[in-house]
């Protein structure tokens, strides 16, 4: 009578563990890449919505005041809407997610929006570039002197 044991050999188990490790590494990298894209996409959409709200309020002459936007590129990146011009009251403020920052090329912006059928931004076109902390993803938002907003995702 033969006593045969059933089971897997040590080399077979090591191969399976190695394959599982490779798959886990690939899955983790894909997850974090997806997460960064989702965060920068969400921040860019919020910023575009904010700029559209600001131009809409300026076009309609809401509250009979000049509306202004401010983008602060510094230690804590944020943007805000002001009622009553550049030195007016802050209506809303949004701080960027900690994984996102304004690029070094994005200068701090302080723009008044003049009410008229075509929005008139004082000064020149404004370009706002959002980037991930590691610089791997970038989203460029431009607002021309008439309030036309375009967004270009570089990922």
Image: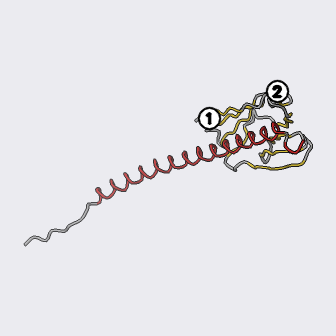
What residue do we see at 75% from left, 32% from top? 105
- Tell me: 77 left or right of 13: right
What residue do we see at 86% from left, 33% from top? 114
Q: Nearer the viewer, residue 25 or 65?
A: 65
Q: Nearer the viewer, residue 16 or 92?
A: 92
Q: Quadrant of residue 117?
A: top right
What residue do we see at 57% from left, 48% from top? 35
State the count of labels: 2
Decide: is 155 above or below 9. above
Q: Which SS class for mark 1? A: strand
Q: Quadrant of residue 120?
A: top right
- Tell me: 73 left or right of 7: right
- Tell me: 150 left or right of 111: left
Image position, residue 139 (x, y; %): 65, 36
Question: Which quadrant holds the N terminus?
Answer: bottom left
Decide: is 21 above or below 41. below
Question: Which quadrant holds the C terminus?
Answer: top right
Residue wearing tag 1: 153
Q: Which SS class for mark 2? A: loop
Image position, residue 22 (x, y; %): 41, 49
What residue do we see at 78% from left, 37% from top? 55
Residue wearing tag 2: 124
Image position, residue 47 (x, y; %): 71, 42
What's the CA distance linking mark 2 and mark 1?
22 Å
Q: Earlier in the sequence, mark 2 or mark 1?
A: 2
Image position, residue 146 (x, y; %): 78, 28
């Amino acid at each position: 009578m033969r006593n045969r044991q059933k089971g897997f050999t040590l080399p077979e188990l090591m191969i399976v563990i190695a394959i599982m490790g490779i798959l886990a590494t690939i899955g983790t990298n894909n997850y974090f890449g997806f997460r960064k894209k989702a965060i920068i996409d969400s921040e860019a959409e919020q910023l575009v919505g904010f700029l559209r709200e600001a131009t809409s309020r300026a076009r309609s002459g809401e509250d009979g005041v000049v509306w202004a936007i401010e983008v602060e590129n510094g230690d804590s990146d944020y943007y805000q809407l002001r009622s009553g011009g550049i030195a007016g009251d802050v209506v809303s403020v949004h701080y960027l997610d900690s994984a996102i920052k304004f690029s070094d090329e994005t200068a701090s912006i302080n723009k008044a929006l003049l009410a008229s059928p075509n929005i008139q931004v004082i000064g020149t076109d404004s370009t706002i570039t959002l980037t991930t902390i590691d610089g791997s993803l970038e989203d460029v938002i431009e607002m021309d002197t008439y309030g036309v907003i375009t967004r270009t995702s570089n990922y």
